Image: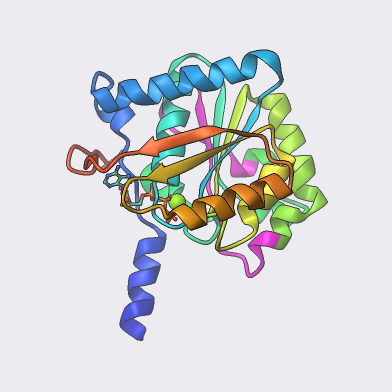
Amino acid sequence: MANKLRQQKKQATKAVSLITLADRTSPISEQYRTIRTNIQFAMVDRELKTLVVTSSGPSEGKSTTSANLAIVFANSGKRILLVDADMRKPTVAKTFSIDNSRGISTILGNRETTLKQVIRTSGIDNLSLMTSGPKPPNPSELLESNRMTDLIQKLKEQYDLVIFDMPPVVAVTDAQIVASKTDGTIMVVRENVSKKDSLLKAKNLLEMVDANILGVVYNGSKNIVDQGYYYGS
Ligand SMILES: Nc1ncnc2c1ncn2[C@@H]1O[C@H](COP(=O)(O)OP(=O)(O)OP(=O)(O)O)[C@@H](O)[C@H]1O
Ligand SMILES: [Mg+2]
């Protein structure tokens, strides 16, 4: 049991692979740029400044997709903020080798905390980061609060695009909550991992809160980890 807990804890702070930083010319980086273009098309007709990245179940590539998308958007000159709104299994601090002593859980849980105290530079031009912060007992309640609604509004004023890395839709309600407060949602589907019935369930849950589902990112089976690169390591 202790072993299992240790393992879960270890998993909870895993870095993801930043292929778009390691090799801008790789076909995978090109694919992230294609996704960027598709999202930009969706941005033409209506304001799209806040974007949720989620999936039906665990380990389907939400954090990998959101971090790499944040990088390619930043590369295009837009001011981008990547928010680790997965307070249950955060990755952003590890991926970008930054401190996680303060983050979204801090600003949502503590009135005295200012935005400045929780936004960090990434070392990549135009990309700022907000990590998860210490694990709170009540992530869903924090995300459902008016403080979260106000925070989203403030972030919209400061950035061209804010990307929220979320937990899976089917397991917990966090992604549903944030999808209902933001402009667009992207679903990541991973080959051989995503299950059809949970995909349908996820779609229904998102539709229930009137999420604006922009599309699906198909995360293939090709191992991007082998070619991977951990920023800062
Ligand atoms: N296409 C892929 N091929 C191989 N490994 C991948 C692929 N996409 C992601 N991974 C790996 O799978 C693991 C899970 O990816 P990631 O953390 O991006 O998923 P997630 O959906 O955010 O997971 P969680 O539900 O834990 O938040 C990571 O170790 C990542 O490097
Ligand atoms: Mg994740």
Q: Quadrant of the C terminus?
A: top left
Locate residue 202, reporting x and y percent. Answer: 57, 52
Residue 143 in magenta stretch: no
Compared to residue 232, the image places residue 103 above or below, namely: below
Compared to residue 185, the image places residue 98 above or below, namely: below
Q: Quadrant of the N terminus?
A: bottom left
Residue 139 in magenta stretch: yes
* In this rendering, position of residue 76 left or right of residue 205: left
Compared to residue 124, the image places residue 2 above or below, namely: below
Residue 27 at least partly seen: yes
Count of marks overlaid on the render:
0
The residue depicted at 45 percent of the width and 53 percent of the height is 196
User: Which residues are drawn in magenta?
Assistant: 117-140
113 and 135: which is toward the camera: 135
140 and 113: which is toward the camera: 140
* In this rendering, position of residue 183 left or right of residue 80: right
Q: Residue furthest right?
A: 146
The residue depicted at 64 percent of the width and 50 percent of the height is 204
* In this rendering, position of residue 85 left or right of residue 28: right
128 and 190: which is toward the camera: 190
Q: Quadrant of residue 75?
A: top left
The residue depicted at 56 percent of the width and 59 percent of the height is 170
Locate residue 105, reporting x and y percent. Answer: 63, 56
Locate residue 32, reporting x and y percent. Answer: 38, 26
Compared to residue 142, the image places residue 188 above or below, namely: above
* In this rendering, position of residue 223 left or right of residue 218: left
Q: Quadrant of residue 71?
A: top left
Residue 90 at least partly seen: no
The residue depicted at 58 percent of the width and 55 percent of the height is 201
Locate residue 47, reporting x and y percent. Answer: 71, 21
